[in-house]
Image (spheres, rainbow, N blue to C red):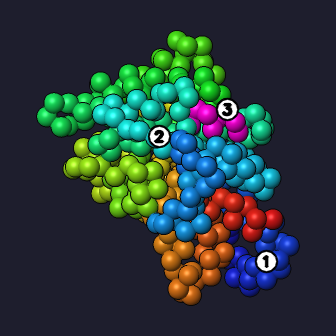
Amino acid sequence: MPAAFPATRLRRLRRTGALRDLVRETTLAPSDLVLPLFVEDGLEGRTPIASMPGVDRHGLTSVVEEAGAAHALGVPAVLLFGIPAEKDADGSGAWDDDGAVQLATRAIKAAHPELLVLTDVCLCEYTDHGHCGRLSADGSVDNDASLELLARTAVSHARAGSDAVAPSDMMDGRVGALRAALDAEGFTETPIIAYSAKYASAFYGPFREAAGSTPSFGDRRSYQMDPGNAEEALREVALDVEEGADMVMVKPAVPYLDVLWRVKEATRMPVAAYHVGGEYVMIKAAAAAGHLDERTAVLETLTSIRRAGADIVITYYAKDAAQWLQ
């Protein structure tokens, strides 16, 4: 824009609603959103999650209904997290072909074949210790031993009909391990959406309650990223791309918009951002207290995530936002 462009002309554009919409640089539509869903093995109906008002754990029938409601609003995809009936040290429920995610994937695809079903690949919801991989004798997470278990999980999800698998464990080498396992089993067309820049964040608290995945000891800082590091995120993303990731992800979203921007600029690949439970409940709590308008705050927040470079936004507000956008 020429330096001499009169400011009054900008104001005229902003005042003229139709023109303002035509020149908007960043758009937000239901088709940009993904709805995360928790499905619990053996649950009938749905159970509210105390830490996340408006979000439920679902049984099989309920998760199909919720997925269909999101699709009817224009949301093109759901992301499934499973809660097993029993947990063990290795998280064997993760690769059970009759596990919660696998059954839900089949049921949703049968009822809503055009809806994309993405499945989270991790062990933390399934292990009795709450960590994202198998433990060594000294109590640390055994990175290499965990890769086989994660690969088995991804193959089980693909066998159930998952449209894309999304490893969130942050084990080194897991994208390559998943790609090799999927290809070996004939799932060469199943994409991998890698949680590539996943930070060790306080904003995961509500999710951990929802999924029952709080570590029973220690924390996840040995395999999730330090919030102070951005260059490391670019290295992590580059490694995942080299190993075969089809899309990369930054998580959480709003505290890491700078990282999101840098990842998009560095890769020019499809990039996802996860607007996590803590970000969701902050808006919910502020709106409930009358401190801000929920609809305006949500749409502004999701637009900012898109503006920073996200091609898709995973958010618990997907249904609400889709309805407001219509």
Q: Nearer the viewer, mark 3 or mark 2?
A: 2
Separation of marks 3 and 1 at Cα, in angstroms = 49 Å
**Residue sitting at 38 percent across and 42 percent down?**
124
Read off the residue under disc 2: 84
- Within 10 Å of disc 2 (Cα), the crowding (few <14, some 14-19, many 20+) is many
Mark 3 or 2, nearer chain start: 2
**Which residue is under mark 3?**
106
Q: What separation in Å lies between label 2 and label 1 (alpha carbons)?
A: 54 Å
Magenta stretch: residue 232 in it?
A: no
Stretch in magenta? 101-108
Q: Residue at x 69, y 65 (%)?
A: 320
Q: Are marks 3 and 1 in contact (CB under 8 Å)?
A: no
Q: As shown in the figure, which amino acid type bears the numbered disc 2?
A: Pro
Q: Amino acid at mark 1?
A: Leu
Q: How many marks?
A: 3
Local secondary structure at mark 2:
loop
The answer to whether 149 appears left or right of 294 in the picture is left
Circle 3: residue type: Arg
Q: Is residue 172 visible?
A: no
Single out the residue that lies furthest toward the left: 138
Q: Secondary structure at mark 1?
A: helix
Which structural element holds mark 3?
A: helix
